[in-house]
Amino acid sequence: MYNAREIEKKWQERWEASNLFESDPDPNKKKKFITIPYPYASGTMHIGHGRSYVNGDIFARYYRAKGYNVLFPMAFHITGTPVLAISSSLERGEKNTFDKMRDYVAIHTSSREKVDKIVESFIDPWNIVKYFSAKMKIDLKSIGMSLDWRREFTTGDKIYNRFIEWQFQKLGELEYLEMGEYPILYCPRCMNAVGEDDIASGDELDLSINEYITIKFPYEDGYLVPATLRPETIYGVTNLWINPEGTYVKALVNDENWIISEEAVMLLQNQNKQITIKETFKGAKLIGKKCKSLENQRELLILPGTFVDTSMATGVVYSVPAHAPFDFIALNDLQKDEKVIKKFNLNYKEINEIQPIIIITLEGFEDYPAKIYCEKYQVFSQNDKDKLDKATSENYKYEYYNGVLNDSCGKYAGINVNEALNLVIENLVNQNKADKLYIPITKDLRCRCGEKINITILRDQWFLNFNAGKWKESAFECLDKMIIIPEKYRINFINIFNWLEKRPCARKRGLGTKLPFDNEWIIESLSDSTIYMSFYTIAHILNGENITPEQLIPEFFDYVFLEEGEVNEISIKTKIKAELLEKMQREFLYWYPVDHRHTAIMHISNHLSFYIFHHVAIYPEKHWPKVITLIEPLIREGQKMGKSKGNIISLADIKEKYSADLFRFYISHSADLGISVDWREKKISILKTHIERFYNFMRDQIAIVKNINGKYGDIKTKFAKVVLSKFIRYFIDADESLKQFNLRRYLQISFYECFNLIQDFKKFAEEETDFHLIFQIIYLDWIKMLSITMPHLSEELWEYAGNNELVSQTTWSEFNTDYIDEDLESEFDYINQLVEDIMNIKKILKSQEYQKIYIYTSEQWKYQVKELVFTKKDDLNQIIDELKRKKILTKDKHIISFVKELIKNRIWERKIPQIDETRLLNEYKPYIENKVGKELEINSNYDPKIKLSKAKPLKPAIYIPI
């Protein structure tokens, strides 16, 4: 009886007691250093995290099985504001945070009283870190992770802080760090710049910042100021839109009178604009008035646009109906709406005389682009918002990449839109006709403290400048040499690398490491988690030898990680023994570089890109990363997991509700790396049954064969040799799949195809002794192969088979290719194809009232023709001449059509087995009859339907009389 919970507990305790996964340098063994992202210790982990961890663990176990000395460590990330946000929120008495933390703690702690006491202690942020890091460790062990826990640390540890200080000193020396002004995401409550780790669901959102251009259209004693992403379109403006119900202000903005929405005031103030509000009014006040265009002082009507969102940018929109679907349809709607025109005392004739102005030439377009895209997406009114969004996106994209500005655009005529954009911006800003406004691409971003995120421009902010020196060039050089799996994600890295410019790297608040040259700032969480893999190589030694932070001076890290300095001098400076310094340097040099990093695709835009950039900045090329494998997020029952949906499964639930091996198998087999895994309970239940059946089957057979000492020469039947040949080939193919990082294919072969084959063999074997002998030959290698995915179950079977060492300690021996017989396999594939064809025919027959199935092999002349086409290929004339010479042409009126069919199928490009079909069918006749459940008649003279004429070489004809 398979008791997963007992088995898994037993082997996890054995592994821990034996320190099985602790790795030290061994100069006599090749090494693999594999890492997965350390978790953020501010909550519980769920099965989505588990996919990354389990896949990484399977790769680590595979490397060990292939004879590598494997370092697979883990630590905990605590840097930044998330932990502080929790403690601050609890200190403020916010019930939502208390309830959320209570739910998290209750996963591991049953007593309500204890839960509340633990959560109350979270007012101290370090209690959050200690609690959740400890529970995460338990959860990771519970799913069979083979980690070296000696190397554990947190990013708040003092010795780690010293390491990060050294890293940033190096970046400073390289002049990759600079101080200045730059638009950043900012939390007004935390008074801090924020990044992915600080924002709720930050790793799932687009945190890019759009640069809007605010255009100053002259109006009375100031300007009406719309904002746009397409300033090159000002030459096609026909009017401006104002929301008549919106609240607007006339404000003194840096000594200029601007008319903008009330909501825009705070946006501008956050971005260092000095603002004094002079007047507040409804937008209706502006309707019907006129401002002037920039290029030729044309008068532009101000029209009502209820679609204008006053909370977006400045709340003022300029209209370019020829090139903007929203403007085109809004103008059309207004021109037809006499009621609205009358309401605002507008001139009907004047409104209807407004015509779109084409300013962009597009090859093949004979009408306004906006009109064409509205028609394409069947946009009939402003209410068709989704269709308008699609039309706008395609319109803008096509014009940007394919459009050329026409003569209406003055000095920019003839310039491509994508080239003119920055020229127009530069010109307008230099002439003080425009300014800049920064808006997050994603609306309503929230800090983990709950506050709404805005954009601000901080003075004296520290940045990493990814365009400095040859930094980006080196990062691309590294990327070019790396293996990225799936390869389709390489373009994501390329796009991110190209996009990266300046990024804030420090905050005024949070946990972590202070900038070594400016202690008011704390290095942010995505900047201190880029080369931490280096620290794994020495963390256990630093802790084990009680080395203090004060001893970890920059020269220490220069020596250990960069091989710089003289060991005795550094020993004197650090008061660390020279032998110990040399040991740490050897440890680093042995394990580095990181051979394999496995994580999820949402980290490409941050962690993974910075991982590459910082490695090429700090380390010589020999220590640059080698491989990154990536997965898509996990969903449940077709839906994204989320607390609001109540569909999150924590890792702690796995051992209670499922089992570790079941989880590991499902999460790795359900989808290829580049596809989302969909967690479906029905499929989980089916898989559970499969695993139980496999375990029980293996136990039963091991009990019989573990004392058998047979050998290959004792095999009696051809069928048995075919099964053995296929097993060895399956093992080799599964191994090759793992080399290609294809976990799904590896499991499909090593579990399902192997299990189906052995069960089929047991059912149809002619000699029971052959079955036992074949099983005895293959089963230990089979257990080894599955042990990297289902380690607990495999350890149990391995022990039951009488082995003393742990299967997790064993290496895979070379598979015995002497057992592979391609000819026998080809013959068996032929037989199986025939069985499949018969079964397919049986499925469509309405009656089962027949006793025999008739099989007819091809006439001899067809073999001769096939051989001839195989040698002459597609030379029809030569083939016909040869058929005439050999007097074959007259044997059947269908010969020419048969020849053409063979040529069409290009049979000479395939490997065609040489099989005596009649002999083979007679040899396997009992097997086929057992499989199809009917008597077989081979090449009978009884052929009422003239099926013989349909038979082809290696494709016998089948007749079932009903």
Image: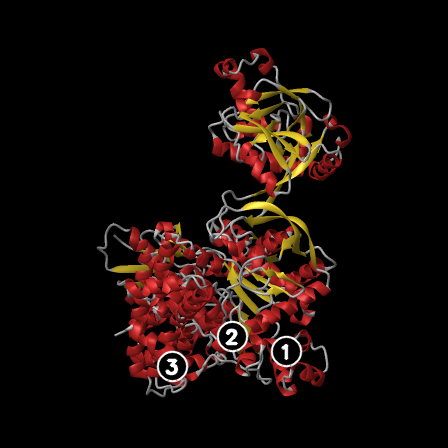
Q: Counting residues from the N terminus, which is met first, the one under dot 1 or under dot 2?
A: 2
Question: Which residue lies under the disc numbered 3?
Answer: 14
Q: Counting residues from the N terminus, which is met first, the one under dot 2 or under dot 3?
A: 3
Question: Relative to 806, is 44 above or below?
Answer: above
Question: Relative to 584, is 272 above or below?
Answer: above
Q: CA distance from mark 2 to mark 3?
A: 21 Å
Q: Which amino acid is tagged 1?
A: Leu
Quarter the N terminus occupies: bottom left
Q: CA distance from mark 1 to mark 2?
A: 19 Å
Q: Is residue 258 left or right of residue 432?
A: left
Q: Residues within 10 Å of mark 3 (few under 14, many from 20)?
A: few
Q: Which mark is residue 63?
A: 2
x%, y% of residue 643? 38, 53
* Residue 316 falls in image quadrant: top right
Q: Please name whichever residue, 261 or 752, is drawn nearer the observer in this view of the structure.
A: 261
Residue plotted at (43% across, 55% down): 89
Q: Which amino acid is tagged 3?
A: Arg
Question: Which residue lies under the disc numbered 1?
Answer: 589
* Residue 105 falls in image quadrant: bottom left
Q: Which amino acid is tagged 2?
A: Tyr
Q: Counting residues from the N terminus, which is met first, the one under dot 1 or under dot 3?
A: 3
Q: Residues within 10 Å of mark 2 (few under 14, many from 20)?
A: many
